[in-house]
Image: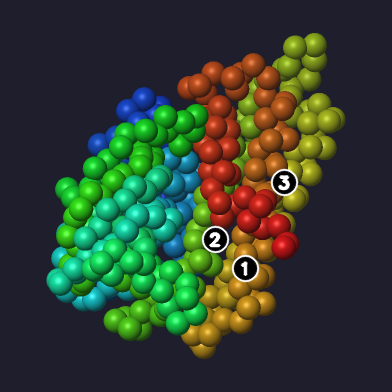
Amino acid sequence: MNTHFREILPEAVFQIFRTEAAEAEKKGALTDAQLQCIYTQRYLRMWIPAALGGDEIPLPDAVALLEALCWADGSVGWVVNLGAGANLFAGYMQPEAASYFFADEKAWAAGSGAISGKAISRQDGYEVQGLWKYASGSAHATLFTFNAWLYDETGHPLKNDVGEPVYRSFAVPAEQVKIISNWQVMGLKATSSDDFAVNGVMVPALHQFDLLHPSPFHQSPLYSFPFLTFAEITTSVMLSGMALHFLDEFDALSRQKKPTGFDQLLGNIPIVERTWHDVQTRFQHARTHFYQTLENIWCVHVESRSLQADQLKAMKQAAGGLAEASLQGVEKLYRFCGMTSIYLQHPLNRIWRDIHVASQHQLVSPLYHAET
């Protein structure tokens, strides 16, 4: 059992997240009890500016919390991670807009990082239309954020000084989007990661924001840390949290189950012992390296607000290594679980499905981490 996570998550909160997981899967969204815990514990406000009543938790501490949440339940951790990560945008918005969207204690941003759709310049802002995919937490969101290509009033695409098309990030209230309920997938079922459409909505210029540069509105290091690196870190740690849950469940199974044809418990069979040791060694090495790299890069950023390309590359590699070790470890051990793990309601099955869906995220793909 990962006892250190019990120091991060209150016992009652952990129990609700874990015991409600099956019901949340059936529902296709988090349960009311899970949601109440998220609001009460202020998980979605971890990266909202203090000026707006947020907590501004330093990145390493927040990442450890997110890993613990994914250990409690993959869908809970995923939704909180994506929701809190999108709520970070409050620090990049003009104060009036940030207050409009995030003053409510239950403010919850869902959305997409993909650049899609059009934002056509109008007198008081932009007319936006488009379709975006995979808005995790859409069932609970109070606002949606997205990126859209910019067009002038005549419908021609705007370009920068070197002739490249330009885009902006936008936020709109949830009631102005159409949720397309198409999240019919094998894992992370309770994340309600549906597509959404915006059809001809007028977005005030005040409700656009820029994630490509440090925020001019807040001095906290959270709002100048490179957002792509931030996303690499927080995506990878979701897989490690799920892997830690899988390791706990496998350890429990290995102490109880005697496979057909064996007089020994599963955990005492030599090939299982060797594989368990190998998985643990590789995973813990990758995890230790990840957290050490994260601590180092965060300290440098806090002190200098300037990170070099080699430092960002090292963090990307550490994040990719953690994601890969997490997935590989689950894969190797799952082969020993036998028929016990094929039932949809068994925790081992749910974790296996969740981590395999999570592993398809672009930022943990081997294609993303391949040297080019």
Residue 148 in sight here: yes
Query: What x and y, as percent, mark residue 225?
Result: 47, 75
Question: Of helix, strand and loop, which one carries label 3?
Answer: helix
The amino acid type, in three-letter code, at marker 3 is Gln
The amino acid type, in three-letter code, at marker 2 is Glu
Q: Residue at x 53, y 38 (%)?
A: 357
Disc 1: which residue: 315
Of residues 196 and 39, the one drawn nearer to the viewer in this rendering = 196
The amino acid type, in three-letter code, at marker 1 is Met
With respect to residue 185, does 44 lie above or below?
below
Disc 2: which residue: 232
Work out which quarter of the rendered image holds the C terminus and state it: bottom right
Assess whether mark 2 and mark 1 are in contact (beta carbons under 8 angstroms).
Answer: yes
Question: Of helix, strand and loop, which one carries label 2?
Answer: helix
With respect to residue 82, does 278 lie above or below?
above
Question: Of helix, strand and loop, which one carries label 1?
Answer: helix
Count of numbered circles on the image? 3
Residue at the extreme bottom of the image, as rendered: 304
Residue 105 in sight here: no
Image-quadrant location for residue 62 = bottom left
Q: Residues within 10 Å of mark 1 (few under 14, many from 20)?
A: many
- The residues tagged by marks 3 and 1 sit, at their Cα atoms, a distance apart of 22 Å
Query: What x and y, as percent, mark residue 60?
Result: 50, 67
Image-quadrant location for residue 103 = bottom left
Mark 3 vs mark 2, foreground winner is 2
Disc 3: which residue: 280
| Among numbered discs 3 and 1, the one appearing first in the sequence | 3
